[in-house]
Image (cartoon, grey):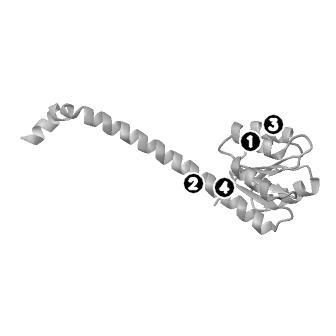
Amino acid sequence: MKTNNHRVLIIDDERPVLMTVEALLKRHGYHVDTAPTASQGLKLLRSKPSTLVLLDLQLPDADGLETLERIKTEVPETQVIILTAHDSLHNAIESIKRGAYHFISKPYAPEELISLVEKAFEKQFLLREAEELREKTEQLERRLEMAEARPTLIFKSKPMQKSRN
Protein backbone atom coordinates (compact mmCIF):
# COMPACT_ATOMS: atom_id res chain seq x y z
CA MET A 1 0.00 0.00 0.00
CA LYS A 2 1.36 3.44 -0.92
CA THR A 3 2.38 5.54 2.05
CA ASN A 4 2.90 8.93 0.38
CA ASN A 5 -0.55 10.24 1.41
CA HIS A 6 -0.56 8.73 4.87
CA ARG A 7 -0.11 11.19 7.71
CA VAL A 8 0.57 9.92 11.23
CA LEU A 9 0.36 12.02 14.39
CA ILE A 10 2.28 10.77 17.42
CA ILE A 11 1.12 12.15 20.78
CA ASP A 12 3.55 11.12 23.51
CA ASP A 13 5.33 13.09 26.23
CA GLU A 14 8.47 10.91 26.16
CA ARG A 15 10.89 12.62 23.76
CA PRO A 16 12.92 9.42 23.04
CA VAL A 17 9.69 7.62 22.05
CA LEU A 18 8.62 10.52 19.81
CA MET A 19 11.99 10.62 18.06
CA THR A 20 12.32 6.84 17.66
CA VAL A 21 8.80 6.25 16.36
CA GLU A 22 9.00 9.31 14.10
CA ALA A 23 12.26 8.06 12.55
CA LEU A 24 10.85 4.55 12.12
CA LEU A 25 7.69 5.78 10.37
CA LYS A 26 9.58 8.24 8.16
CA ARG A 27 11.90 5.41 7.06
CA HIS A 28 8.76 3.59 5.91
CA GLY A 29 7.59 6.60 3.91
CA TYR A 30 4.96 8.09 6.21
CA HIS A 31 4.43 11.81 6.84
CA VAL A 32 4.78 12.27 10.58
CA ASP A 33 3.81 15.02 13.02
CA THR A 34 4.59 14.87 16.73
CA ALA A 35 3.14 16.45 19.85
CA PRO A 36 4.26 16.07 23.49
CA THR A 37 0.84 16.97 24.94
CA ALA A 38 -2.80 16.21 24.24
CA SER A 39 -3.66 19.87 23.63
CA GLN A 40 -0.86 20.29 21.08
CA GLY A 41 -1.84 17.01 19.46
CA LEU A 42 -5.49 18.01 19.12
CA LYS A 43 -4.49 21.40 17.71
CA LEU A 44 -2.22 19.67 15.15
CA LEU A 45 -4.95 17.19 14.25
CA ARG A 46 -7.34 20.07 13.49
CA SER A 47 -4.82 21.94 11.34
CA LYS A 48 -3.21 18.93 9.60
CA PRO A 49 -5.68 16.06 9.55
CA SER A 50 -4.01 12.69 10.11
CA THR A 51 -5.36 9.33 9.11
CA LEU A 52 -3.73 7.69 12.11
CA VAL A 53 -2.86 8.82 15.63
CA LEU A 54 -0.43 6.97 17.88
CA LEU A 55 -1.51 8.01 21.37
CA ASP A 56 0.12 7.54 24.76
CA LEU A 57 -2.30 7.11 27.67
CA GLN A 58 -0.16 9.01 30.20
CA LEU A 59 0.09 12.63 29.07
CA PRO A 60 1.02 15.63 31.23
CA ASP A 61 -2.06 17.70 30.39
CA ALA A 62 -4.84 15.15 29.85
CA ASP A 63 -5.97 11.59 30.33
CA GLY A 64 -5.21 9.50 27.25
CA LEU A 65 -8.63 7.83 27.24
CA GLU A 66 -10.35 11.23 27.32
CA THR A 67 -8.07 12.41 24.51
CA LEU A 68 -9.03 9.31 22.53
CA GLU A 69 -12.71 10.19 22.97
CA ARG A 70 -12.10 13.76 21.80
CA ILE A 71 -10.24 12.53 18.71
CA LYS A 72 -13.03 10.08 17.83
CA THR A 73 -15.66 12.79 18.42
CA GLU A 74 -13.91 15.49 16.40
CA VAL A 75 -12.49 13.29 13.62
CA PRO A 76 -14.31 9.93 13.82
CA GLU A 77 -12.68 8.47 10.71
CA THR A 78 -9.20 8.79 12.27
CA GLN A 79 -7.72 5.49 13.39
CA VAL A 80 -6.03 5.52 16.82
CA ILE A 81 -3.44 3.09 18.13
CA ILE A 82 -2.75 3.34 21.86
CA LEU A 83 0.95 3.13 22.80
CA THR A 84 1.52 2.83 26.53
CA ALA A 85 3.91 1.61 29.18
CA HIS A 86 0.96 1.49 31.58
CA ASP A 87 -0.77 -1.51 30.13
CA SER A 88 -3.58 -3.19 31.92
CA LEU A 89 -6.56 -5.20 30.83
CA HIS A 90 -8.80 -2.34 31.96
CA ASN A 91 -6.93 0.21 29.79
CA ALA A 92 -6.97 -2.11 26.79
CA ILE A 93 -10.71 -2.77 27.08
CA GLU A 94 -11.53 0.91 27.67
CA SER A 95 -9.40 1.95 24.70
CA ILE A 96 -11.19 -0.42 22.34
CA LYS A 97 -14.61 0.53 23.76
CA ARG A 98 -13.85 4.20 23.11
CA GLY A 99 -12.87 3.58 19.51
CA ALA A 100 -9.17 2.73 19.41
CA TYR A 101 -8.11 0.53 16.53
CA HIS A 102 -5.53 -1.28 18.65
CA PHE A 103 -3.60 -1.20 21.92
CA ILE A 104 0.13 -1.92 22.10
CA SER A 105 2.40 -2.02 25.15
CA LYS A 106 5.80 -0.34 25.36
CA PRO A 107 8.37 -1.60 24.65
CA TYR A 108 7.28 -3.10 21.35
CA ALA A 109 9.13 -4.50 18.37
CA PRO A 110 9.44 -2.00 15.49
CA GLU A 111 8.09 -4.53 12.99
CA GLU A 112 5.05 -5.09 15.23
CA LEU A 113 4.30 -1.35 15.24
CA ILE A 114 4.81 -1.02 11.47
CA SER A 115 2.49 -3.99 10.90
CA LEU A 116 -0.21 -2.37 13.06
CA VAL A 117 0.21 0.96 11.26
CA GLU A 118 -0.15 -0.73 7.87
CA LYS A 119 -3.25 -2.60 9.04
CA ALA A 120 -4.80 0.61 10.41
CA PHE A 121 -4.29 2.33 7.05
CA GLU A 122 -5.72 -0.69 5.26
CA LYS A 123 -8.80 -0.54 7.52
CA GLN A 124 -9.16 3.18 6.76
CA PHE A 125 -8.91 2.48 3.01
CA LEU A 126 -11.53 -0.28 3.22
CA LEU A 127 -13.89 1.93 5.25
CA ARG A 128 -13.60 4.71 2.65
CA GLU A 129 -14.13 2.24 -0.17
CA ALA A 130 -17.21 0.79 1.55
CA GLU A 131 -18.63 4.31 2.02
CA GLU A 132 -18.08 5.12 -1.67
CA LEU A 133 -19.82 1.89 -2.68
CA ARG A 134 -22.70 2.63 -0.32
CA GLU A 135 -23.11 6.08 -1.90
CA LYS A 136 -23.00 4.65 -5.44
CA THR A 137 -25.59 2.02 -4.50
CA GLU A 138 -27.89 4.71 -3.09
CA GLN A 139 -27.52 6.76 -6.29
CA LEU A 140 -28.34 3.75 -8.46
CA GLU A 141 -31.34 2.87 -6.28
CA ARG A 142 -32.67 6.43 -6.64
CA ARG A 143 -32.20 6.33 -10.41
CA LEU A 144 -33.95 2.97 -10.60
CA GLU A 145 -36.87 4.27 -8.54
CA MET A 146 -37.16 7.26 -10.86
CA ALA A 147 -37.06 5.03 -13.95
CA GLU A 148 -39.65 2.66 -12.51
CA ALA A 149 -41.91 5.58 -11.65
CA ARG A 150 -41.98 6.76 -15.28
CA PRO A 151 -41.89 3.70 -17.57
CA THR A 152 -44.51 5.12 -19.94
CA LEU A 153 -42.23 8.00 -20.89
CA ILE A 154 -39.74 5.56 -22.37
CA PHE A 155 -42.37 3.88 -24.55
CA LYS A 156 -43.85 7.18 -25.71
CA SER A 157 -40.57 8.39 -27.16
CA LYS A 158 -40.40 8.32 -30.98
CA PRO A 159 -37.32 6.06 -31.17
CA MET A 160 -39.00 3.49 -28.92
CA GLN A 161 -42.23 3.61 -30.91
CA LYS A 162 -40.28 2.94 -34.11
CA SER A 163 -38.47 0.00 -32.52
CA ARG A 164 -41.78 -1.55 -31.46
CA ASN A 165 -43.12 -1.54 -35.02
Looking at the image, is mark 1 or mark 2 earlier in the sequence? Answer: 1
Q: Which residue is mark 2?
A: 126
Residue 62, percent from left and from top:
87, 41
Q: Mark 1 touching mark 2, by CB under 8 A?
A: no
Element at badge 4? helix
Q: CA distance from mark 3 to mark 2?
A: 27 Å
Q: Which residue is mark 3?
A: 43
Q: Quadrant of residue 159?
A: top left
Element at badge 3? helix
Residue 33, percent from left and from top:
81, 48
Q: CA distance from mark 1 to mark 3?
A: 15 Å
The amino acid marked with disc number 1 is: Glu
- Residue 149 shows which numbered tag? none
Q: CA distance from mark 4 to mark 2?
A: 9 Å
Looking at the image, is mark 1 or mark 3 earlier in the sequence? Answer: 3
The amino acid marked with disc number 3 is: Lys
Q: Mark 4 touching mark 2, by CB under 8 A?
A: no
The amino acid marked with disc number 2 is: Leu
Element at badge 2? helix
- Residue 121 shows which numbered tag? 4
Element at badge 1? helix
How many C-alpha atoms fall within 10 Å of the one at disc 4: few (<14), some, or many (≥20)? Answer: many
Q: Is residue 48 visible?
A: no
Q: Which residue is mark 1?
A: 69
Q: Quadrant of residue 68?
A: top right
Q: Mark 4 touching mark 1, by CB under 8 A?
A: no
Q: Quadrant of residue 67?
A: top right
The amino acid marked with disc number 4 is: Phe
